[in-house]
Image (tube, rainbow, N blue to C red):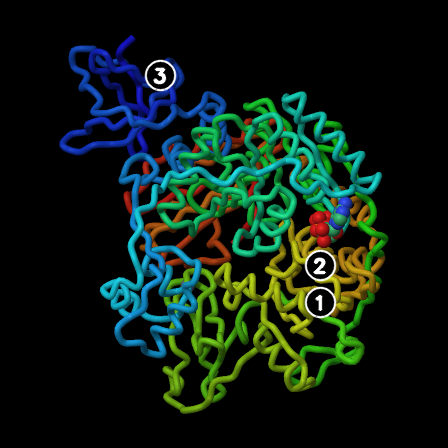
Amino acid sequence: MNRVRLLVLNAALGPLDYRLPDGVAAPAGSVVIAPLGPRKVTGIVWDEGRLPGDAIAFERLRPIVEVLPVPPLPEALRRLIEWTADYYCAPLASVARMALASGGALGGPAVMTEYRLSGGTPERMTAQRLAAIEALEGEQGTIRELAGIAGVSEGVLRGLVNQGVIEPVSVAIDRPYDPADPDHAPPDLSPEQAAVAARLVAAVRARKFAPFLLDGVTGSGKTETYFEPVAEALRCGHQVLVLLPEIALTENFLARFSARFGAAPVLWHSSLKSTERRRAWRAIADGSAQVVVGARSALFLPYAKLGLIVVDEAHEVSFKQDDGVRYNARDVSVMRARFEGLPVVLASATPALESLHMAAQGIYEKLDLPSRFGGASLPQVRLIDLTQEKPGSQRWLAGPLIEGLRDRLEKGEQSLLFLNRRGYAPLTLCRNCGHRFKCPSCSAWLVEHRLSARLACHHCGFETRVPDACPECSEGDCLVACGPGVERIADEVRGLFPEARIALATSDTLNTPERAAQFIAEAENKAIDIIIGTQLVTKGFHFPELTLVGVVDADLGLEGGDLRAAERTYSQVAQVAGRAGRGAKPGEVLIQTRHPDAPVIAALADGDRDAFYAAETEGRRSAGAPPFGRWAAIILSSEDEKEAREAAVRLGDVRPRLEDVQILGPAPAPLALLRGRYRYRFLVNARRSANLQAVLRDWIGSVAFAPGVRVGVDIDPYSFV
Ligand code: ADP
Ligand code: ZN
């Protein structure tokens, strides 16, 4: 048959039919360029009969322009794209886009120019040139990258190019990656670890769908353990995908990977350079990328011969994408494993309630690592009741926590203070007139960042200089910071212990791989006494000298009041607590709270995870919340308040009345204004018996909205703003 139906990468268009020119083959999955009016579009040849639409007479079909020279998307991936679009009520084209991730991978030049030292010396040596030459020993990259490494301007390096001191080299972008060796440096596993590893290795050999929940306490060696099935997949010649939540901070992971396998894995994340993206995409598609370590977007890539998926820190909220296609990479991973027929491992010390429920039902096989590796014990946890132990005015650390810090400083051990709030203060106001600094495009306060002397919106990225005078009443020098962020805690610690070496660890300070690597090296070399950090420091780190963790405000996460607030607080505090006492010295955790009796706080104090999950499960059961019922959010937004409101009212007027689906709303969203768009929301709660997606599609599809209105559907929402 030489007619094809294309899934075109444009969500506004439906499937389109084309003709294949004589002699051109394009099996399902082929990526092609096709004419569309005067323009061209990229499309994927889809399986016959799977995309709806009327057939057009063959004579009227236009021929496609070109079949791109990349492997066709495999069938399992095509089924995954369909499933994801269907489940999350997203356009097929938007999901397919994630598989093709990189326009540049599909075409473009295969060669680029990089630069390196030639060995020559410049006619005139300056201090800057000398410094640059020393810094660039053994380095190779674009002028811009080298300027970054050497800390000089690109102009300085161009001067050196003109003098022949730096020479251009052509680099094949698609050059192969260094091979990983499954037997490079295998560890001696503990008997506990070995048993779990053996089960996973057997599953890799069996190569059929098998979902596992690897439930291991912090420091139990989950990584070492799941590296064994990774090694087995390599021996079988299969590819492996390891999904990690926070790709910016994987230095530690990468070092461990290289030590185990003798080569770095292939990285995939949103800030790859376009050449790196192309190289990785092509190696993934032709099967030569052996192990891919990536953020959630790595999940939709066209692996040629995948043999294993690992989702590390699988409970992490950042696996849920909150814009575009609102999918949860943890859940889609399991579906991908099912379509591909392979094992998938969800690893966590604090699994999501949904995952534990699947294990309890026997759908996931649960593997346990109940103790820390090498005989380290889990830390002692103690609550500090802030209603009794009051910090001083404009202070946030209570007496016992300060004493704990002092004690560690005297012993030469490390402490970590955790507060999940970037910046100096979450709210700034004018002492004179009470004016509060608010984002112009969001209903949110601006957060003061003293390090950069800015007020910033954490929702849309808006930033402005901290003004000298109040914009409302013009009074000078009148701004007051309200409440603490990590920068303010750092100030307090500096005031208490001027001699302590303090490091701030947030996405503002550790914003490049180099800075992250430097932070880790300093912490490991005992060049830091007190780390003050946001959720960035809650996972992955292993600092043997760290013996005290202080949670500055355990109640913070509970304030949002959404469905998962307690679970998120539990896992966040348990994870950060898990950084303490991982080496030979025992750890202690001090949790500051105003609600010591709240069930989640009490469970943390008692280390009683089972009790917490049991209570939480019952709460969810009686609320009909996941995993017992399903939630969905519908958000209608427009730049025009009235238009958004009217759209919400119209949709509300035609809501379906069903026995097993309850629809709440419309109501202004908690973030009623976001990035300049006014937002209204519905919350839908469905019983398991309902076909939630079909109900939503019919309902939303029955209303024709004004062009300025956007309708977002969020299935299994994590964010309730
Ligand atoms: P988790 O991810 O479960 O918190 P990690 O995988 O980070 O634990 O392991 C904790 C520490 O123990 C790491 O430094 C790791 O290298 C070490 N470790 C774990 N298992 C072994 C082993 N079998 N042999 C040597 N070191 C191990
Ligand atoms: Zn904003």
Question: Residue placed at 50% from the left, 46% from the top?
Answer: 665
The kind of residue tagged 3 is Pro
As drawn, the label of residue 551 is: 1
CA neighbours of label 2 inside 10 A, class few (<14), some (14 to 19), many (20+): many
Q: Which residue is mark 2?
A: 573
| First in residue order: circle 1 vs circle 2 | 1
Mark 3 falls on what kind of element? Answer: loop
| First in residue order: circle 1 vs circle 3 | 3
**Residue 182 in the image, given as x and y percentages of width and height:** 63, 35
- Contact between marks 1 and 3 (CB within 8 A): the answer is no
Q: Is mark 1 within 8 Å of ligand 1?
A: no
Mark 1 falls on what kind of element? Answer: strand
- Relative to residue 425, is residue 11 drawn left or right? left
Residue 185 appears in the picture as rendered: yes
Residue ranking furthest to the bottom: 476
Question: Residue placed at 20% from the left, 32% from the top?
Answer: 40
Label total for image: 3
CA neighbours of label 3 inside 10 A, class few (<14), some (14 to 19), many (20+): some
Residue ranking furthest to the top: 1
Q: Is mark 2 within 8 Å of ligand 1?
A: no
Which is nearer the eye, 173 or 488?
173
Residue 594 appears in the picture as rendered: no
Whether residue 199 is situated above or below residue 323 in the rendered picture = above
Which is nearer the eye, 429 or 248?
248
Whether residue 682 is situated above or below residue 414 in the rendered picture = above
Query: Ligand 2 is found in which quarter of the picture?
Result: bottom left
Q: Quadrant of residue 526?
A: bottom right
